[in-house]
């Protein structure tokens, strides 16, 4: 029971409680009745809509776990392939730089020999 020392607005809330409950109850009953009538008038569309909604929910919440093969074989092999590819690219770049550096060294040596012979 609400204390008589509460402000007058609390009495308004207390008095409106039963009205709000009956309004919510009536609204719920009306909505349920309207929904039932809609389903009876459109059973095919309702069924298709429910199937689509269920499929969408299943897609949203499903998370496939990787298999043991994917987790312990294919995953590490993919990582190893990536590592080898990166190493190959790095070695290729370094070898290319060394090759060009050695060519320029040979050219400088040949130029010195030509100058000394002339």
Image (tube, rainbow, N blue to C red):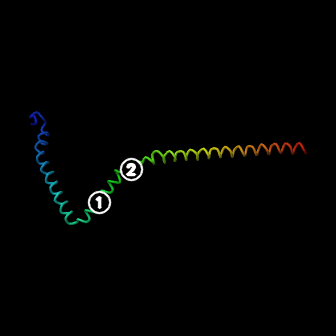
- Residue 26 on image: x %, y %: 13, 54
Foreground residue, 67 or 32? Answer: 67
Q: Residue at x 26, y 65 (%)?
A: 45
- Residue 52 on image: x %, y %: 31, 59
Q: Earlier in the sequence, mark 2 or mark 1?
A: 1
Farthest top residue in view: 5
Q: Quadrant of the N terminus?
A: top left
Left or right, residue 54 beside residue 111: left
For label 2, the residue is: 64
Q: Quadrant of the C terminus?
A: top right
Quarter of the image where one finds residue 99: top right
Element assignment for label 1: helix
Quarter of the image where one finds residue 113: top right
For label 1, the residue is: 51
Q: Residue at x 37, y 49 (%)?
A: 63
The residues tagged by marks 2 and 1 sit, at their Cα atoms, a distance apart of 21 Å
């Amino acid at each position: 029971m609400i204390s008589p020392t509460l402000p007058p607005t609390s009495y308004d809330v207390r008095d409106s409680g039963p009205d709000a409950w009956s309004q919510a109850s009536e609204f719920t009953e009306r909505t349920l009745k309207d929904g039932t009538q809609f389903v009876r008038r459109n059973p095919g569309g309702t069924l298709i809509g429910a199937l689509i909604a269920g499929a969408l929910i299943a897609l949203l919440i499903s998370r496939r776990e990787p298999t043991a093969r994917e987790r312990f074989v294919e995953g590490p092999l993919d990582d190893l392939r990536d590592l080898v590819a990166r190493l190959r690219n790095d070695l290729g770049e370094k070898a290319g730089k060394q090759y060009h550096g050695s060519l320029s060294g040979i050219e400088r040596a040949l130029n010195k020999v030509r100058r000394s012979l002339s």
